[in-house]
Amino acid sequence: MAALTAPRPDRNPKPDRNPKQDRSRATRQRLLEAAVACLAERGWAGSTVAVVAERAGVSRGAAQHHFPTREDLFTAAVEYVAEERSQALRTLRTDTREQAVEALVDLYTGPLFRAALHLWVAASDEAQLRDRVTELEARVGRESHRIAVEVLGADESRPGVRETVQGLLDMARGLGLATLLTDDRARRERVVAQWARLVNEALSD
């Protein structure tokens, strides 16, 4: 019977995971997700640190450990929403232009965009948020246009194509605004279907 050979020690052992740091990151993530959800459901006025902490399932003290002020919390939420929207854009995959139009509109009518709208409203009155929201929205806007061009297969060297793509995004944003007040899904589906036809005609050779 062959002798058992003891395994050689790893010369570059991986550092042990720090459970405390893991819990801290998880708490921060829950707070950011709760902040976004509260903004989407309650708006700026109803989204206090205490409300967010309760939704996240943590104490107010724990929330203030991560975000000492309400402005700190929602400035971080601005960055989180922007990154999540960018990630949603980067993972967008469609087979046809009609599907691309529908997918782009969905990004503007979902909960992340609703949260972004509430952040815009808050930033109009909160100087500490305004510059950060403006900067991040400009970045997301540029990325939205670039990815829309990509998924639509649009050739912006042709006259009118850039304006067609931007018009689609403006229309989607308008539909997103409308969803704040009413659930007009049936009307939206008809509008999106018509826009899909117009975009396909405008971008076809």
Image (tube, grey):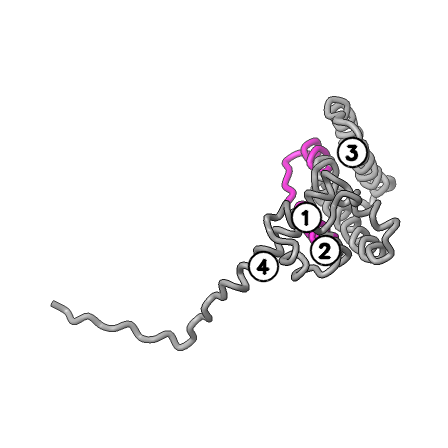
Three-letter code for the amino acid on which mark 3 is drawn: Leu
Instruction: Mark 4 or mark 1: name the one nearer the start of the chain.
Output: 4
Instruction: Mark 1 or mark 3: name the one nearer the start of the chain.
Output: 1
- In the picture provided, is 1 more to the left or to the right than 25? left
Report, in whole angstroms, how far the alpha carbon at label 1 lies from the one at label 2. Answer: 9 Å
Residue 148 in picture, x, y percent from top left? 74, 43
* Residue at 87% over, 39% down: 160
Report, in whole angstroms, how far the alpha carbon at label 1 lies from the one at label 3. Answer: 21 Å
- In the picture provided, is 10 more to the left or to the right than 158? left
Q: Of helix, strand and loop, which one carries label 4?
A: helix
Instruction: Mark 3 or mark 2: name the one nearer the start of the chain.
Output: 2
Tell me which corner region of the image, top left, top right, bottom left or bottom right, holds residue 64. Answer: bottom right
Name the quarter where the N terminus is drawn.
bottom left
Are the residues tagged 1 and 2 within 8 Å (C-beta)?
Answer: yes
Name the quarter where the C terminus is drawn.
top right
Classed neighbour count for the residue bearing mark 2: other residues with Cα under 10 Å, few (<14), some (14–19), many (≥20): many
Q: Which residue is mark 2?
A: 73
Instruction: Mark 1 or mark 2: name the one nearer the start of the chain.
Output: 1
Query: Which residues fall within the magenta stretch?
Result: 78-104
Q: Residue furthest left?
A: 1
Q: Of helix, strand and loop, which one carries label 3?
A: loop
Q: Which of 92/83 is in front? A: 83
Tell me which corner region of the image, top left, top right, bottom left or bottom right, holds residue 6. Answer: bottom left
Q: Of helix, strand and loop, which one carries label 1?
A: helix
Three-letter code for the amino acid on which mark 2 is drawn: Leu
Q: Which residue is mark 4?
A: 25
Residue 21 sits inside the magenta stretch: no
Three-letter code for the amino acid on which mark 1 is drawn: Val
Q: Which residue is mark 1?
A: 52
